[in-house]
Image (cartoon, grey):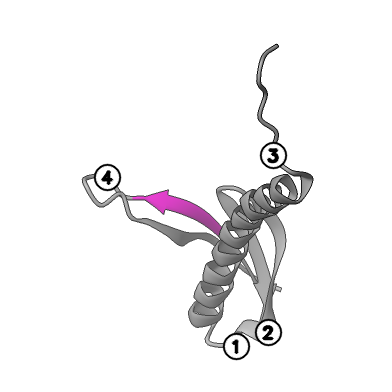
Amino acid sequence: MLATSRIPLSAGALLLTTVLGFGCTTSNLTQEQVLKTAADDLGCTVVDVEIVDDKPFQKVVEGCGSRLVYVKSCGGGASGKCQWKVVEHERL
C-alpha cells in the first residue's frame, strides 16, 4: 500500500487564501500607485480620481475634470524599474 500525505482542509484553505491574497495585494498596490500618480499629475487629491479602465499594462483615470491614460513603462538595465507614465491627457 502506498503512503499518501494529505494536507488537512484547513491548511489547504489557508494556503489558497494566502496565495490569492498576494495577487490581490499586488493589484491593489498598483492601483494605489496609479491613483497617487494621477492625483499628483492633476494637482488634486486621491479621493478625487478613479480608475475607470483597468488593464494589466494600461490604466485610464478620470478626475478633476480630466481623463489620463497611463501605460506601464519599464526601464532597461539592471534595475528594471517600472513606472506609470501618461500617454494621453484629455480635458472633460
Toward the top, the furthest residue is 1
Q: Which residue is mark 2?
A: 48
Q: Earlier in the sequence, mark 2 or mark 4?
A: 2
Discs 4/3, front = 3
Q: Distance from label 2 to label 1 (Cα)?
A: 5 Å
Q: Residue at x 65, y 57 (%)?
A: 21
Of callouts 1 and 3, the N-terminal one? 3
Range of residues picked out in magenta = 70-74
Residue 74 horizontal side relative to residue 58, left or right: left
Q: Residue at x 33, y 55 (%)?
A: 81
Q: Amino acid at mark 3?
A: Ile
Q: Quadrant of residue 85?
A: bottom left
* Secondary structure category for the residue under label 4: loop
Q: CB atoms at circles 2 and 1 under 8 Å apart?
A: yes
Which residue is identified by label 1?
45
Q: Residues within 10 Å of mark 2 (few under 14, many from 20)?
A: some
Task: Determine which residue is flagged by label 4.
Answer: 76
Tell me, yes or no, whether the two marked residues, 4 and 1, touch with CB atoms within 8 Å: no
**Mark 2 or mark 3, earlier in chain:** 3
CB within 8 Å, label 1 to label 3? no
Q: Disc 1 residue type?
A: Thr
Instruction: Give the camera-side residue of 32 and 18.
Output: 18
Q: Residues within 10 Å of mark 1 (few under 14, many from 20)?
A: some
Q: Amino acid at mark 2?
A: Asp
Mark 4–mark 3 CB contact (< 8 Å) = no
Inter-mark Cα distance, 2 to 3: 46 Å
Give the residue pinned by disc 3. 7
What secondary structure do most residues of the magenta stretch adopt? strand
